[in-house]
């Protein structure tokens, strides 16, 4: 019987850990913004955060600094800025209309001395409060969805505002 022979290239003297590291192809870098060196999806998502006017400042920075070829960041910057402007204009406009409605009701109530006018005033107030709350909910939900979609790398368009953002991006 033959004794087993060690494999070719075997050297006695101890065990050596095999070299498992094999360099692979380089990992491609994700594209980044020019200004803050952020990944595109992070930059797009940050445009929507309503914290200390970031939702107004960051979109202006990205609109002014990013090249027109960067459609993703520019689209979300324009959409976030238009969304913020619509929220401000809608909120202030609704509040002004509510105050005008109250003033008219008080003037009518003082001039006519009718209790029905007071009931009408309550109805007008409830209507404006419901409209303002619905508008605020629409703005909140739109901002949350757009923020989540931007962080996911998607270009979701807010109704009406998204068309304008796509046009200017």
Image: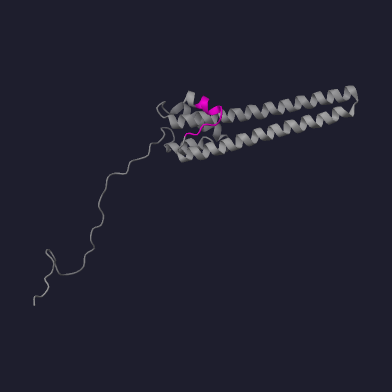
The answer to whether any part of residue 52 appears in the image is no
Residue projecting furthest to the left: 1
Identified at 49% across, 32% down, the residue is: 76
**Magenta highlight on residue 66:** no
Q: Nearer the viewer, residue 135 or 46?
A: 135
Residue 81 appears at what percent x and percent y?
A: 54, 29
Q: Is the residue 28 above or below the residue 135 in the image?
A: below
The answer to which image quadrant residue 36 occupies is: top left
The answer to which image quadrant residue 14 occupies is: bottom left
Residue 164 appears at what percent x and percent y?
A: 52, 24
Q: Quadrant of the N terminus?
A: bottom left
Residue 129 appears at what percent x and percent y?
A: 73, 33
The answer to which image quadrant residue 121 occupies is: top right
Residue span colored magenta: 155-165
The answer to whether any part of residue 86 appears in the image is yes
Residue 72 appears at what percent x and percent y?
A: 44, 32
Give the left or right position of residue 17, taking residue 149 as reference: left
Give the left or right position of residue 118, taking residue 165 as reference: right
Give the left or right position of residue 14, taking residue 87 as reference: left
Q: Nearer the viewer, residue 163 or 59?
A: 163
Residue projecting furthest to the bottom: 1
**Magenta highlight on residue 164:** yes
Residue projecting furthest to the top: 111
Give the left or right position of residue 72, taking residue 24 as reference: right
């Amino acid at each position: 019987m033959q004794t087993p022979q060690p494999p070719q290239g075997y050297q006695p003297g101890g065990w050596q850990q095999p070299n498992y590291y094999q360099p692979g192809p380089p990992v491609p870098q994700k594209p980044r913004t020019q200004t803050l060196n952020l990944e595109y999806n992070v930059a797009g998502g940050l445009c929507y955060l309503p914290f200390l006017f970031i939702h107004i400042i960051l979109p202006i920075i990205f609109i002014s600094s990013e090249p027109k070829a960067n459609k993703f960041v520019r689209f979300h910057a324009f959409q976030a800025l238009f969304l913020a402007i619509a929220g401000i204009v809608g909120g202030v406009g609704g509040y002004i209309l509510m105050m005008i409605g109250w003033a008219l009701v008080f003037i009518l109530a003082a001039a006519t001395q009718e209790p029905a006018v007071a009931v009408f005033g309550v109805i007008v107030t409830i209507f404006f409060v419901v409209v303002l709350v619905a508008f605020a909910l629409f703005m909140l939900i739109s901002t949350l969805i757009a923020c989540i979609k931007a962080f996911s790398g998607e270009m979701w368009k807010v109704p009406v505002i998204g068309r304008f953002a796509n046009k200017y991006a």
